Image (cartoon, grey):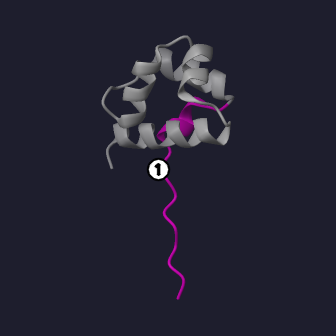
Amino acid sequence: MDLREVFATNLRRLRHAKGMSQDDLAYSAEISRSYLSKLEKGVFYASLKIIGRLAETLEVEPAEFLQMPQTPTKKR
């Protein structure tokens, strides 16, 4: 999984955890909904400025966007 995919996965997860729609997050972070959608799909790279806005809006540390997703462990 490349960093763009990791970012996209974490962005979606964090947005859902806050119970926000794409419209709500885009409005609060002062970016367009279509740009946010493309970030969540991994189409675009996010600048540090955008990562900062998203982190502030979602009330998380910017580093959370780049953490590798936890893989579920298999039960034996």
As drawn, 71 above or below 20: below
Instruction: Classify residue 13 by image quadrant.
Output: top right
Main SS category, magenta section: loop
The residue tagged 1 is 68
Query: Image check: 24 left or right of 33?
Result: right
As drawn, 2 above or below 25: below
Q: Secondary structure at mark 1?
A: loop
Q: Residue at x 54, y 83 (%)?
A: 75
Q: Is residue 64 magenta?
A: yes
Magenta stretch in the rendered image: 60-76
Residue at the far top: name it.
30
**Does residue 4 appear anywhere in the picture?**
yes
Q: Position of residue 57 (x, y in %)?
A: 65, 22
Crowdedness near tag 1: few (<14), some (14–19) or many (≥20) residues, C-alpha within 10 Å? some
**Does residue 47 appear anywhere in the picture?**
no
Q: Residue at x 49, y 13 (%)?
A: 31
Q: Residue at x 55, y 22 (%)?
A: 23
Q: Position of residue 26 (x, y in %)?
A: 54, 19
Q: Is residue 20 magenta?
A: no
Q: Residue at x 65, y 32 (%)?
A: 60
In this view, the residue in front, 35 or 59, is 35
As drawn, 39 above or below 14: above
Instruction: Classify residue 52 by image quadrant.
Output: top right
Residue at the far bottom: name it.
76
Instruction: Classify residue 3 by image quadrant.
Output: top left
Q: Position of residue 58 (x, y in %)?
A: 65, 28
How many numbered markers are drawn?
1
Under mark 1, the amino acid is Met
